[in-house]
Amino acid sequence: MTTRVGILGATGAVGQRFIQLLENHEGFELACVTASDESAGKSYGDAAKWRVDTPIPDDVADLIVRETSPEAIPDDVDLLFSSLPSGVAAEVEPGLCEAGYVVSSNSSNDRMAADVPLTIPEINPDHLGLIEVQRDERGWDGALIKNPNCSTITMVPTLAALDEFGLERVHVSTLQAVSGAGYSGVTSMEIIDNAVPHIGGEEEKMESESRKLLGSFDGAELSLHDADVAASCNRIPTLDGHLENVFAETTADPDPDEVRDAMAALPGGDLPSSPDPLIHVFGPEDPDRPQPRMDRMRGDGMQIVAGGVRTTAEGVKYNCLAHNTVRGAAGASVLNGELLAAEGWI
Ligand code: NAP
């Protein structure tokens, strides 16, 4: 059965990725797009400054952009993908859920709310059960489900693999692409020939969201994982693909082969957009991989890529990478939508 879907904030960097990923999707049919009042009423082709590496689908270019409000969404749409600025999302997403829509959102508002599932389908699909708690508490017919921040989702699958060795402490330093800040986020004068060692709010998101994603849900309440996570986030002049250097301390003392095997063994899942396997792991013969330009499109941009696994007396060092607007944003929301559909929530 096909589910009719809409995209909130469809003209932006993540919104355009949604359009690309939904073209010819086997389970979702794009029925409406929304954006700010400045774009509403225009055709999508006129409103969006299209910058994705495939052409705008003709039928999407002709769609009229709607306002972002419950009244503007057609009744026969069941699932909304949200790529709104978080302040806007915090205002409009609850009203849409109250009006009966299921919202699969990228925006950072409410990711840490106790009754909002923050999910990566291959890692913590059981957390979707929080929807029952949310509906009981908020009286919604719809539901709000979030995917994590783009830098968090790049690292967490690798940490899930390390958890079998007793994950205790994580230090991570990121090299993040400019598309992570959206189209108006970083000017060329700031970033060309430069690196910016601060991304507002990003470190806190990595530190808290990782513990929620790796936490456990007992059917009523979610407990955070007790690992300490410390992040340093940096913007660099790559276009797409966040690269991260991770140092993890575990209670056991795995050797590099055991770490690589644990990462490579994580299954990709059987949803339409699932990569297989979840993590591509480079061995010691490729010590300079992963790299953003070479590896961000692995698994159609949905695979996590790891490499450079080394061990020290104190812990494990490695590098990981993911495409920030595909796996780190639109693709993550689409995958969550596929999980919602597969499990009968829509
Ligand atoms: P963006 O390029 O700035 O796009 C923002 C979108 O929201 C545009 O469609 C814009 O429409 C719309 N919008 C802005 N103000 C609005 C308003 N008042 N009412 C309705 N729509 C409004 O941003 P982005 O990079 O796509 O990010 C979108 C969200 O995803 C953010 O919350 C961001 O934190 C999150 N996210 C981004 C990434 C990434 O890698 N970029 C990764 C993970 C999560 P107009 O064109 O009409 O202005």
Image: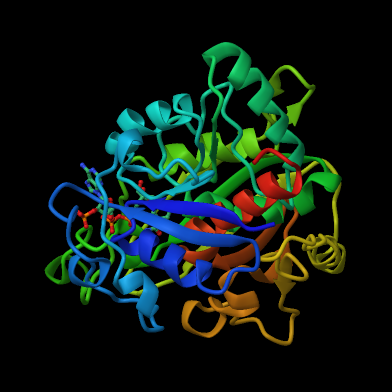
Query: In this orientation, does residue 216 appear?
Result: yes
Horizontal side, residue 273 vs residue 21: left or right: right
Give the quadrant of the C terminus. Answer: top right
Residue occupying image coordinates x 74% and y 42%:
125
Q: Residue at x 47, y 83 (%)?
A: 293
Task: Report the coloring of the rendering.
Answer: rainbow
Dividing the picture into quadrants, the one containing residue 17 is: bottom left
The tally of labels here is 0
Please determine whether, in this image, residue 67 is positioned above or below residue 294: above
The reply, left or right, for residue 75 in relation to residue 226 is: left
Residue name at image x 17 percent, y 61 percent: 42
The residue closer to the viewer here, 257 or 61, is 61
Look at the picture and state if 342 lies above or below 23: above
Q: Where is the N terminus found, in terms of image quarters?
A: bottom right
Q: Write the residue at 38% across / 27% down.
A: 95
79 horizontally vs 314: left or right: left
Tell which of 169 and 29 is nearer to you.
29
Rendering coords of residue 307 (x, y %): 67, 72
Q: Quadrant of residue 32?
A: bottom left
Q: Is residue 131 or residue 109 the one in the foreground?
A: 131
| The quarter of the displayed image where residue 334 is located | bottom right
Q: Position of residue 94 (x, y in %)?
A: 41, 27
